[in-house]
Amino acid sequence: MDDDTGALPPKNDFSAWYNDLLWRAEIMDVRYPVKGLYVWYPYGFAIRKYVYQRLRDLLDRDHQETLFPLLIPEQEFMKEAEHIKGFENEVYWVTHGGTTPLEVKLALRPTSETAIYPMYALWVRSHADLPIKYYQIVNTFRYETKQTRPLIRLREITSFKEAHTVHATWEEAEQQVEEAIALYREFYDGLCIPTLISKRPDWDKFPGADYTIAVDTIMPNGKTLQIGTVHHLGDHFSRTFNITYEDKNGEQKLAYQTCYGISERSIAALISIHGDDKGLILPPDVATFQAVIVPITIGKRHEDVMVAAQKLKTDLTAAGFRVKLDTRDLRPGAKYYWWELRGVPLRLELGPRDLDAGKVMAVKRTGEKTSIELATVTEGMKRVLSEITDTLRARAEEHTRSHLCNVDSMDALNATLNEGKVAVVHWCQQRGCGDVIGEKTNANILGSDVRSLLVPATEGKCIACGKPGKTTLVGRAY
Ligand code: 5CA
Ligand code: ZN
């Protein structure tokens, strides 16, 4: 860290707050000398570990983890026309082995369809092999031209979870899309991150997909962040890569596919949505440390308190909590500040009087103080941590609710977006009107068919042309 002095900017100065917090709380170091590439500090990497463990646990219910090579030969990469068009400006190429030019250029995967599907063509033989549901968690490379930002828009995405499935029919693939949406919903609900799930306009779908369902969230400044996507690939790739299977009647059939991905944007959202003016606030389920014990040792009771604090740590660790005992030679106030900045959800203050009363003072990072009986400390911890989770979830939901606004005219749309809100409009689904909306407001149509209780489908007129339209989200996106 270069500068430990000065204060964190207030959260309402969001982008200053975000950039500052990343190094102050030791999540990412942005000083790596390649644009768009960043370094995980161990503290940030531990958050990633717990977040991704949850993602793995959800996937492992009915997916299998795999690992494919980073390099993709040019011929494979160039096979699917729409896919190439979508990615050709973003691909890094490996052209040399040492000083020798390579006979076949190799792409650094921007995503792995063209690495995985040639192998799927070999692996899928019969209907009995289907469905296939594999995923990998890898780094991918995209030469992004929009402004790069740590955890949000990277040129090396370090934590790309991509799932790739194969099915016998289009309908089964569609069913898988629904399952993936449910899985992402559960994942984000576990992180207390509200989601707006909608169908992207046709021109904004993944290159090579039949349709794309996107998961967005509203960041503190009102901008939306796409934190996951689920794509129905139809038979676009199975035609190209010849992924066929023999059905029950002995006929060769084309397979149908889906893919869906999540990146470290999930962690950008986690940090941004829950943090406050003092720093990070981590939901207990994914916190590096769920509680920090700060011994308050004034005068001659020093030994007693230290022994009790050590015992408390041992007991809580044995009960499965992630606990830090801070024995550094610092004033308690300095320790409070340190751990508040780093988002530890609960602080346990243990002093001589608490000890005599058989209690420990529990200060929630979300605000209130309470005390926990040492005799039943495990139950007490569980209760208080789950209260913190509930508070974070309620605050985040309130933020989303208060940043959605129904709008039925172009003027009102602009005003709403300028206030840092996401607009709920009606749109006729025509590209022309989509372009008008985009040009007049410098915003994006996020999607229609919104799956959120906060955004019920209603009847209304297209905000651009007045014809009947569907309920649609419009926002300024990262
Ligand atoms: N093959 C498909 C599904 S895995 C795919 O690549 N989809 S994607 O392009 O939409 O990417 C999946 C998710 O990764 C996006 O929804 C977004 O949340 C995240 N993502 C995409 N590009 C970046 C980037 N440059 N930096 C960080 N995250 C990104
Ligand atoms: Zn219209």
Image (cartoon, helix red, strand yellow):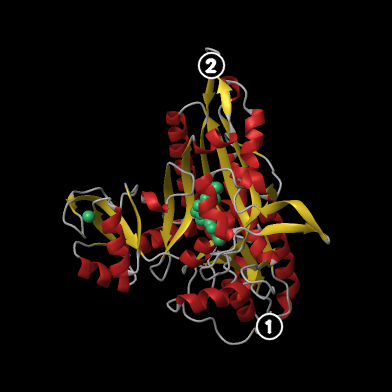
Q: Name the image quarter holding residue 98.
A: bottom right
Q: Name the image quarter holding residue 210.
A: top left
Is 62 placed above or below 464 here? above
Is 434 placed above or below 256 here? below
Select label 1 or label 2 by which is in front: 2
Residue found at the very far top of the displayed protein: 249
Left or right: where 445 falls relative to 464: right
Q: Nearer the viewer, residue 342 or 243?
A: 243
**Quarter of the picture holding the C terminus:** bottom left
Determine the CA span between mark 1 and mark 2: 66 Å
Residue at image point 63% right, 68% down: 27
Kindly identify which numbered label has been placed on residue 2.
1
Residue 342 x %, y %: 60, 70
Residue 142 x %, y %: 59, 60
Is 6 placed above or below 175 here? below
Q: Name the image quarter holding residue 445.
A: bottom left
Name the kind of residue labelled 1 in the image: Asp
Q: How packed is label 2: few (under 14 Cα within 10 Å), some, or many (20 or more)?
A: few
Residue found at the very far bottom of the displayed protein: 6
Residue 393 x %, y %: 43, 57
User: Residue beneath label 2, please?
Assistant: 251
